[in-house]
Image: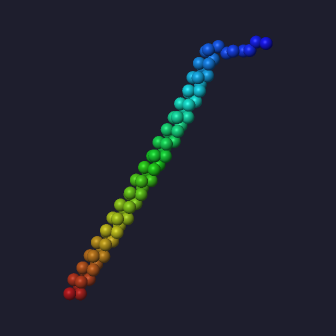
Amino acid sequence: MTSHIPPRSSYLIAVVVAAAKVEVVVVVVVVAVAAEAAAAAVVVVVVVVVVVVVVVVVVVAAAVVVIVVVAAVVVIL
């Protein structure tokens, strides 16, 4: 009985294929992490924009209230 021993080149091919699979997994993980980071950055930007808009609306509303009160006081006096 003779056992089949693959030549060294097939071991090399197997190592290259395994390395390529690892590299693909690493690339997929890096892309997924980058996408997650980008999504998180978008969420942060959206939250900041919403907060700024709310602050601007509150300030404008406060200014309108002050103007109305001042105008009412002037009219009354």
Horizontal side, residue 18 vs residue 34: left or right:
right
**What is the residue that sits farthest to the bottom in this orientation?**
76
Q: Nearer the viewer, residue 51 or 28?
A: 28
- Position of residue 72 measured from the top left corner of the image (x, y, whole percent): 26, 83
Instruction: Give residue 24's quadrant in the image.
Output: top right
Q: Nearer the viewer, residue 44 or 49?
A: 44
- Position of residue 50 measured from the top left corner of the image (x, y, whole percent): 40, 60
**What is the residue that sits farthest to the top in this orientation?**
2
Q: Quadrant of the C terminus?
A: bottom left
**What is the residue that sits farthest to the right in this orientation?**
1
Query: Does 63 appear above or below 77?
Result: above
Q: Nearer the viewer, residue 59 or 21?
A: 21
Instruction: Give residue 64's quadrant in the image.
Output: bottom left
Horizontal side, residue 29 vs residue 69: left or right:
right
Query: Does 76 appear above or below 30?
Result: below
- Position of residue 29 measured from the top left corner of the image (x, y, whole percent): 52, 39
Looking at the image, which residue is at 52% across and 34% down? 26
Q: Quadrant of the N terminus?
A: top right
- Position of residue 40 measured from the top left corner of the image (x, y, whole percent): 45, 50
Looking at the image, which residue is at 33% across and 64% down? 56
Give the colour scheme shown.
rainbow
Horizontal side, residue 27 vs residue 63: left or right:
right
